[in-house]
Image: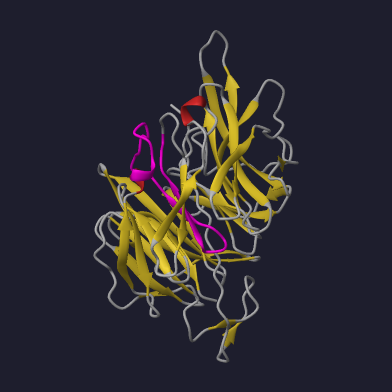
C-alpha cells in the first residue's frame, strides 16, 4: 500500500494597515492590535467554526459561529470566499466583513471526470496565489482521468471549469498523492508520494497555464544522497512563497531474501525550483536534520511559515517540531517535540508569528480533537494560554490573513 500524505500551503492575503495602536513581531514590522490579524476557520463533522485571531495569539468566536455546515473538509480561502468539499460537492461560501460565512453555491465536480475516476473522502482544494483559480484534487485512482481539476473563481464566487491536469494515475505518471502545494510566483505546483512498488520517491510537477489551468509537467525522482546500501523515499512537501520546497523524507532499507523493506527514520530536506520547474537539492544524509516526531512512519503534515523562516513538521502520535527553514540550504534544528502524544493533522500560519495546529489524542478507543496556537519567534516557540482547546470531531483548518 502506497504512502499517502496530507499537506497544504497557507495563503498570505494582506490588507492595508490603518493608524492605530501597533505591536512589533518577528513576522511583520507592525501589527494593528485593535483589529484581528486573521480569521481562522476550523471544520468538524457538524460545523464550521470561525474565529478572530488577535496579535497576542488569543482568538474569539466570530458572531454566529459555529456555522451549521456539516462534514466540510480540505478548505481553501480567498479574501472573499471560502471553498470546501464534502466528498461529493465543491461548495462556495461568502466571507462577510466580520468573518462570518454563508453558503453561496455548489457544484458536483465529478461530472467533469471519467467514469474510471475513483474518488475517496480525502479530496482537497487549493487556491492559487492570484486568488483567481481553484484546484480540486479529484481522483485517487483510475485510468485516463485527471488528478486535479481547475476552476476559475468568478467575481460572484461561482466556479467555471477550465480543464484537468492530464495523465494516467494507474500508469504511474501521476502516482497516488492526496494534496497539492503551490509555490510562490504562481507558475508551479507540486505534490509527492513514495511508490511502494518501486520504493522510489516522487515529486510531481504541475505547471499553471495562462488561463489558470494546471497541467501535469513531469516528475522529479532525485532524492537526497543516502548512506551506502540505503536510500530515501519521499513524504509530504510544502512550498514557500519563493521557489523552495521543504520535503520530509524517510530512509528505506532493503532486507535480504525478498524480506521487504525497513522504513525510517525520517529527515527534512529542501529543494529549489528553477524557472522551468526543475528541482535540485543540496540535502544529503550528512546535513539533513532528523525528524524524531515523524519516526519510522513518516511525517503527517509539513508547512512553511509565510516569511519562509520556519517549517513545522507533524507526526502520528509524536506531536510536532519547528525547524529553521533556510531556502535552498538544508533546514536546521530549532525545537524538540511539542504536543507530545498528539496526532498532527493540519497546520496554519498567520503573518503575526502564530502557528495553528489541529491535532488529536487517542484514548479509550476514540480520538479527541484539539486546536492549539503557538507564538513562533527567533527566540523560541511558546504555547498560547488556553491551548490545546478541545473542539469535537475536527477535520481541517484554514487561515485567512488580514494583516
**Residue 127 is covered by the magenta coloring:** yes
* Residue 74 spot, x, y in % from top left: 40, 53
Count the numbered circles shown: 0
Q: Is residue 336 visible?
A: no
What residue is shown at x 53% (from left), y 55% (from top)? 9
Q: Residue furthest top?
A: 257
Q: Quadrant of the C terminus?
A: bottom right
Q: How is the image coloured?
A: secondary structure
**Residue 121 is covered by the magenta coloring:** yes
Per the picture, the main secondary structure of the magenta-coloured stretch is loop
Q: In the picture shown, does residue 273 fall above or below 306? A: above
Q: Is residue 103 visible?
A: yes
* Residue 222 spot, x, y in % from top left: 68, 33
- State the residue in front, 304 or 15: 15
- State the residue in front, 45 or 116: 116
Locate residue 210 relative to residue 155 in the image: left or right: right
* Residue 7 spot, x, y in % from top left: 50, 48
Q: Quadrant of the N terminus?
A: top left
The stretch of residues the image draws in magenta is: 111-140
Locate residue 172 relative to residue 289 in the image: left or right: left
- State the residue in front, 324 or 213: 213
What residue is shown at x 43% (from left), y 29% (from top)? 143
* Residue 77 spot, x, y in % from top left: 45, 64
Locate residue 304 relative to residue 117 in the image: left or right: right
What residue is shown at x 33% (from left), y 43% (from top)? 121
Q: In the picture shown, does residue 133 fall above or below 117? A: below
Amino acid at each position: 500500500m502506497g504512502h499517502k500524505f496530507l499537506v497544504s500551503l497557507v495563503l498570505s492575503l494582506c490588507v492595508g494597515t490603518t493608524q492605530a495602536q501597533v505591536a512589533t513581531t518577528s513576522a511583520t514590522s507592525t501589527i494593528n492590535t485593535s483589529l484581528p490579524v486573521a480569521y481562522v476557520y476550523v471544520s468538524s463533522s457538524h460545523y464550521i467554526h470561525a474565529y478572530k485571531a488577535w496579535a497576542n495569539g488569543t482568538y474569539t468566536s466570530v458572531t454566529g459561529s459555529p456555522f451549521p455546515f456539516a462534514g466540510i473538509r480540505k478548505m481553501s480561502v480567498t479574501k472573499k470566499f471560502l471553498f470546501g468539499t464534502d466528498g461529493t460537492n465543491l461548495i462556495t461560501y461568502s466571507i462577510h466583513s466580520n468573518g462570518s460565512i454563508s453558503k453561496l453555491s455548489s457544484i458536483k465536480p465529478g461530472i467533469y471526470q471519467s467514469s474510471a475516476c475513483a474518488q475517496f473522502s480525502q479530496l482537497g482544494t487549493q487556491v492559487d496565489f492570484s486568488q483567481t483559480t481553484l484546484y480540486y484534487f479529484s481522483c485517487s485512482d483510475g485510468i485516463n482521468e485527471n488528478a486535479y481539476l481547475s476552476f476559475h473563481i468568478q467575481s460572484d464566487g461561482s466556479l467555471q471549469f477550465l480543464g484537468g491536469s492530464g495523465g494516467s494515475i494507474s500508469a504511474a505518471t501521476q502516482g497516488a498523492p492526496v494534496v497539492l502545494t503551490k509555490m510562490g510566483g504562481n507558475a508551479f505546483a507540486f505534490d509527492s508520494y513514495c511508490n511502494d512498488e518501486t520504493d522510489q520517491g516522487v515529486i510531481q510537477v504541475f505547471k499553471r497555464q495562462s488561463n489558470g489551468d494546471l497541467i501535469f509537467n513531469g516528475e522529479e525522482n532525485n532524492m537526497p544522497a543516502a548512506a551506502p546500501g540505503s536510500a530515501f523515499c519521499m513524504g509530504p512537501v510544502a512550498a514557500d512563497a519563493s521557489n523552495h520546497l521543504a520535503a520530509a523524507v524517510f530512509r528505506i532499507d532493503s532486507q535480504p531474501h525478498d524480506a521487504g523493506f525497513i522504513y525510517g527514520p525520517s529527515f527534512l530536506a529542501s529543494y529549489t525550483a528553477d524557472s522551468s520547474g526543475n528541482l535540485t537539492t543540496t540535502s544529503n544524509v550528512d546535513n539533513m536534520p532528523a525528524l524524531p516526531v515523524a519516526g519510522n512512519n513518516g511525517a503527517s503534515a509539513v508547512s512553511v511559515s509565510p516569511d519562509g523562516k520556519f517549517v513545522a513538521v507533524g507526526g502520528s502520535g509524536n506531536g510536532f517540531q519547528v525547524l529553521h527553514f533556510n531556502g535552498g540550504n538544508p533546514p536546521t534544528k530549532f525545537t524538540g517535540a511539542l504536543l507530545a502524544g498528539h496526532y498532527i493533522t493540519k497546520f496554519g500560519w498567520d503573518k503575526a508569528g502564530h502557528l495553528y495546529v489541529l491535532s488529536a489524542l487517542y484514548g479509550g478507543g476514540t480520538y479527541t480533537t484539539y486546536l492549539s496556537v503557538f507564538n513562533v519567534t527567533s527566540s523560541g516557540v511558546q504555547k498560547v494560554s488556553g491551548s490545546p482547546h478541545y473542539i469535537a470531531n475536527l477535520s481541517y483548518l484554514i487561515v485567512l490573513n488580514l494583516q
